[in-house]
Amino acid sequence: MNDTALADLLRQFGLSGKAIDTYLTILEHGEAKASTIADAAGVSKRYVYSISETLEDRGFVSVNDHVVPTTIRANPPADVVGALSRDLETMQPALEARYSETEPADDRFEVIKSRVTVLKRIRSHIDDADDEVTLSIPNAHLGEVAEELEAAVDRGVLVLLVVTGVGPQSELDFDGIASVVRAWTEPMPTMLTVDRRVGLVAPTEMVVRTNSDARAILFSERRLGPVIVGSFLGNYWPMAEEVYATEAASLPRTYRNFRHAVLQATLHHRSETPLFVRVRGRRLPEGDPAELGGRLVDVRQGLLAPANNSFPVENSLVLETADGVVTVGGGGAFVEDFEADEVILDVTEEP
């Protein structure tokens, strides 16, 4: 081990660079007067006396002040290492006790015990949404998250909302708080996903009743996000009845969220607006990066009523391109010809 590496190790035990130079000089001399050590280490004689007391307390040296002049003797390295080891062994139980008190929990999952906290977490995560929110919530508590939902819609987030405990004929105003709203008289779990990375599931009784012992689960795990979205769109969304849908957006517009692109493509397609679509992503099944463009000829989707997809979570664009008809799906596409990362919708031939 060279001097630099040795100095780095000694520094970890709290010695300054100046103290290390002095101690290494004492080691090289074995035993010497303060003046000799000072000259060799390039420090003052007063500093040698001062640091020698500290080194003696740490077990590095012995100060022979019963002789004149005083000498400082390096303790055998084995004794020094033994003293340091004993210090570490003495410190270990205290460190372990403190570690057990502050050991971080797995922040990917949180168990929530109260309805108040559930609603607080929902508001917080909606505020953080960048491109997509799916939410089911009892109508009685919709007002507690309506402001956050409206702000998300205003910044361009796709919001798919199921309001439970209310019939589709109820005269409720959902304008501006979601992209699409469905109502269902039956109770269902309160479910939230944000950008397919954060999710929350709360049993029905936990949100409806004030004295429930049920618990909610909040997770930050990208592998689980699509599972919850799939359950939301596959099991609950089809059971509820559409009560509100946003208007078609002005074009051209770029979408990183594929479902948002499908929603807007559907609205324009139904109004017979001719759309040219450009897509960046990958050709399937090879997965090679590619771009394609073509005229929109059909949309298969289940976001807006009436649905025309062949299975609940299918959402795809059908384009007529120079190479023929191509089907485009979103992330994780497996039945389509192309997996999209970005979709540009326009009414012209060159978006």
Image: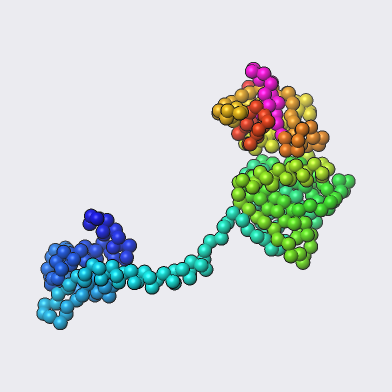
For this rendering, which residue is in front, 132 or 82?
A: 82
Image coordinates of residue 190 in percent, x first then y, are 74, 53
Report the side of 90 relative to 345 (left or right).
left
Residue 128 visible? The answer is no
Picture residue at 70% right of the left edge, 31% below the top: 316
Report the side of 29 relative to 299 (left or right).
left
Queried whether the magenta region covers residue 153, the answer comes back as no
Picture residue at 67% right of the left edge, 56% below the top: 217
Quarter of the image with the C terminus in it: top right
Report the side of 335 relative to 97 (left or right).
right
In the displayed image of the protein, which residue is found farthest to the bottom?
A: 66
Residue 57 visible? The answer is yes
- 282 up-or-down from 8: above or below: above
Queried whether the magenta region covers residue 319, the answer comes back as yes
The answer to which image quadrant residue 213 occupies is bottom right
- 305 up-or-down from 185: above or below: above
Report the side of 198 relative to 48 (left or right).
right
Image coordinates of residue 70 in percent, x first then y, are 14, 77
Picture residue at 18% right of the left edge, 66% below the top: 27
Q: Which residues are magenta?
A: 315-328
Image coordinates of residue 184 in percent, x first then y, are 83, 48
Picture residue at 33% right of the left edge, 69% below the top: 85
In the displayed image of the protein, which residue is found farthest to the right?
A: 169
Image coordinates of residue 293 in percent, x first then y, are 63, 23
State the predominant SS element of the stretch in magenta.
strand
Q: How many marks are shown on the rendered structure?
A: 0
